[in-house]
Amino acid sequence: MRSLRRLSSLVTVPLSIGMSLSGGEFNSNIAGTLNTDYTFYDTTQHASLATHFPGSVVRLSTTIARLCPTIGTVDTTKGGELKTAIGYANTNGLKVLVDLHDGAGKWISGTNYKVGSVTYTQANFASDLSALATYLNGTAGFWGISLTNEPNGLAVGTTSGNYNTTATWTLAANAATSAIKAVNSAIKTVVCTDNYSGFQVLVSTYPTNPFTNTDYIEIHCYFDSDNSGSYSGGNAYFSGSGRDINYAGDTLNNCATWARTNGCKLWCGEVGIPAYDEGYITMLNQFYNSAVQNSDVVKGITAWATKTGWYVSTTAIDITKTAGAMEIIGNYNGTSS
């Protein structure tokens, strides 16, 4: 990885290069009102994305609690809003990965219950995912479902000792994936790894791949010292992060080696760096170069972005507003996975 350099010309690569579009999540008013409590990208913004990332997959965030207030049933108003957003993407030649940004939980009557609890069982979770897959099946531009964002805090957390036996998330994800595939096997399924999905712990947490019926395993790739993506304190600049300049590229390369060994494919669901810093820019370039070099198993990257003018969270790092970052990403013309 030491010889990686910033590219000087456009390179077409056999993986999807796109954006993770925040705005449809992060609000305590779960039901809420579109464009008041949550939002989606409109057709103009999708057109702009299509200019930069033609034909790519975009990751569109929402929540299962909003879409399925009743277990196993999609609310047609909220579902219709999502279909409209998917239609905007489709009109501009993009495909949509629906990101259920729930942390493996669901808000029910004002309380967040984790998957596997008495109130929100694994069967309930699979029922919700089946209902959503059925509702979206056949919608032009709908590509797949990311089952939940950054699962955490489950009854039996995943360790290297139980990852393929008793870990709650492994059992729930495999059941929900099967439920989606029963609707239509062509719907792409993407499963985040447990314990916040950091790429830095993929190999140590999962000696082998326990998600045997999914299309992609999702990892999140932030480069600050705690891999949170908040880039707070000293992490605001590369010099304060304590990272080696090769950290991002080397870590993704390790993940790719693991995926190749285990016969599976990776999706980098979130990637981000803070305001312009040459060290982080170099790391980002090495990260994308590593993805290119490992594109037989790294099949998609969706960098974190927010809708213009829309408050999302204090820790969201919008890569589209980071000077130099889009220059790096713009070097790559991905092809849809």
Image (cartoon, rainbow, N blue to C red):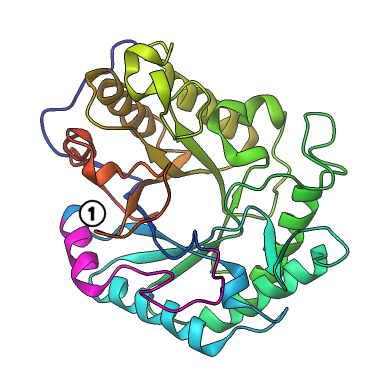
- In the rendered structure, does residue 47 fall within the stretch colored magenta? yes
Query: Can residue 258 be seen in the rendering of this structure?
Result: yes
Q: Nearer the viewer, residue 120 or 252?
A: 120
Which quadrant is home to the C terminus?
Answer: bottom left
State the SS at label 1: loop
Q: Position of residue 187 (x, y in %)?
A: 54, 68
What is the magenta range?
Answer: 28-51
Judged left or right of residue 281, residue 40 is: right
Q: Where is residue 296, by image quadrant?
A: top left
Query: Can residue 184 be seen in the rendering of this structure?
Result: no
- In the rendered structure, does residue 117 fall within the stretch colored magenta? no
From this viewpoint, which residue is outermost toward the left? 9
Q: Position of residue 89 (x, y in %)?
A: 30, 70
Q: Where is residue 146, by image quadrant?
A: bottom right
Residue at label 1? 53
When the figure is inspected, residue 85 is found, relative to residue 73, above or below; the finding is above
